[in-house]
Every structure is written in structure tokens, then in C-alpha cells.
Image (spheres, helix red, strand yellow):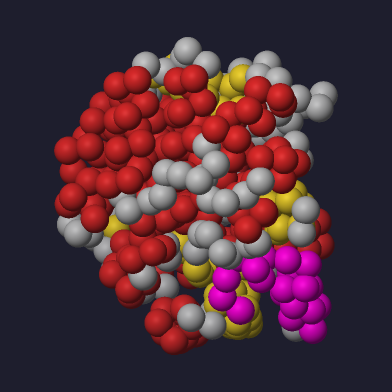
Amino acid sequence: MNPSIVTLQVSLAERTYPILIGSGLLTTADNIARQLPQPRVVLISNETLWPLYAAAFQARLESVGVSVVPIRLPDGEAYKDWANLNLIFDALLRHKCDRLTTLIALGGGVIGDITGFAAATYQRGVPFIQIPTTLLAQVDSSVGGKTAINHPLGKNMIGAFYQPQRVLADTDTLKTLPDREYRSGLAEVIKYGLILDAAFFSWLENNIDKLMQRDAVALAYAIQRSCEIKAQVVSEDERETNKNGGRALLNLGHTFGHAIESALGYGVWLHGEAVGCGMALAARMSNQLGMLDKVSTERAIKLIERAGLDSRLPAIPADEMLDHMGRDKKNEGGAIRLILLRQIGEAVVDGTVPASRIREFLVSQAT
């Protein structure tokens, strides 16, 4: 194997699996073909990525004797829905795919999420592999086994915890990633420093210009460190059962962010754009609640903005935001559970902030 390839482990007893990170992983099918329970796969990607990567990867799989059923979905968050999930099921049934057929998700978070959910539910579970091609997917959504589709009333509300067999993050795919998609992924990288690693956050402050220029060395470290943090958290709290922290902390910015996505309409703001804004809102609210000091609040917001992300709430009425936040998956007993910051590198789960106080804060943030 290429010595520049980094291999990490998500440790989940018998479901432990590797994350491979590096250049050139898509130039060979060997990393997948040797691991298949049978030489048959369903390759799921989107219309944008098919001519860039999926068609060539299908040919590589077939060249080593793997039979491939190709599925090409529309590109975009708006298509992470029942209709496109059923397109996958239709193809699986039409081609008589069995429980040893492996589903391969080649794409960003949308493809990974919908493919993972299809794998979790088809014949009560079939193997699947993640090949994330966006920065956001490589550092976050492809790792950890959260799979889902969207509902018009809430993002990722219909899904399952279902772990992949392996994750292959080919950093070469980031070379063709549009700037907006790239910046969106940086939001999730910043999140890891804010919630659990103050030293990594400081490194990001010192290297954000290199990351914006897609410097290969800086980018490789940012991806590796993000995946190390995500793998550790998932290994310790796979199904988000730790009510006081654990995997729930990975949702910093997401309660606000998911509400923004739902209110504006899926795809108007990219997921990472909404999360970046959501993290800035969480920092400001933490400061207003007396938890996060002013200097740390300003550091968090400045780094988000240096990554090319908007830190200000878009023009969404406070009551509409609050309505969407009230449907968040983390909520319990009617209370909105927020992820807030005590300091950079230390996040907490807080379900004690009254809805009236959250509304007051949202009104204060209106642009």
C-alpha cells in the first residue's frame, strides 16, 4: 500500500472498520475488491460525479472481476428524499440483489447518507462502503454510521445508525471540488477544534490561509485530525446515548444549522454553510449566557468568517427558526437541547435554556 496512505480505525468490537485517507485511492479497485463478500456491488453516485470519478471506478472494479450495478442519482440536498431512496430500492430489486451485495456510496454527504440508509434497510441490512468525495463528507458524514433522508418538516429525521465496512477518502477528489463546497467542509473541520481540541483550533487559526489555498500538507493534517476525533467519539458513544456529551457534542451548530436549512429550503444553503453560521450563533449564545468569554467568542466567529462562511443569521423569522429547532432529534421532553461552549475545546449539552430565551436571542440576531 502507498506509504502516504493513513489508516485509522473506528473501534466498535466486531463492527470495527478502517478509514483510509490519502492520494490515489480511487486509482485502484484493490482496496475494495479483496474485501467484498461476493464479487458484486451496486455503485451509487450522482450525475455530476459520474463522468469525473464513478464511470472510471466502475471500469476498474469490472477489470478485476467485480460485477457492477450502476445507479446515477440527481445532484443536490433536495434529492435526499423518499423518491430517490426508492430509485435505489427499485434497482436492487430489479437486479435481484441479495444480502451479500455491497452498496458503494461514491459522493458527498447526500450520496453517503441515502446509500447508507438504503443499505441499512434493504433486506434488513446489506454491506456498504463509503467513498467520500467532498471535504465535509471526508471529515464528518462518511464516518460514524449516521444514515438518513430528509423530510419536508425536518432534516435527517428518517434514518438509522448503520456502520460502513470501510471508508476510503481519496484527497485527490478535493481538487475538483467547487470553492463553495470546499468552504462548507471547513465548517466541520473547525467544529472539531471548538468542541474537543483547543490545540487543533489554534493550529487552524495559524493555518486557515493555507487551507483556503488547499495546501496539500495542511489539508492532509486537517482531514486526519478531524477523522481521529470523530472516530474516537463514535467509538465511545456510537448511538448518541450519552446525554451529557459524547457524540451529541458533534452537533455543535447543527440545531441552529438544520433549522436554517429547513426554513430556507434544502439546498439553498449548503449543510456546512448552515453549520458554520450555527456555530457562530452557538458561540454568541454561549457568551450571552455567561459561559464563553468575549475573546473566545470573537476567536470562534473570526475563524468561521476567515473560512469564507457567513456568521450572521439569514432573514428567517425567530418563530419559524424556533419551530424548526423544536423538531430537532436531540430534543427531549419538549425541551430544546443546545450544544454550547464553555471554552474553546470544551462543549456541553444544555437542555435548560427556555424557548422564550432562545427566541429572544434569535430576535437579537436578526439581520
Q: Is residue 13 visible?
A: no
Q: Above or below — where is 301 with respect to 55? A: above
Query: Along the horizontal axis of the image, is 160 left or right of 132?
Result: right
- From the top left corner, tell me how far across and down residue 31 is, in percent: 41, 64
| Nearer to us in this view, 176 or 205 | 205
Residue at x 78%, y 53% (from the top left corner): 153
| Nearer to us in this view, 238 or 335 | 335
Residue at x 22%, y 59% (from the top left corner): 214
Give the quarter of the image for residue 194: top left
- Report the predominant secondary structure element of the magenta stretch: helix
206 in the magenta segment: no
| Nearer to us in this view, 316 or 80 | 316
| Nearer to us in this view, 36 or 308 | 308
Q: Which residues are magenta?
A: 74-94
- From the top left corner, tell me how far across and down residue 255 is, in percent: 61, 38
88 in the magenta segment: yes
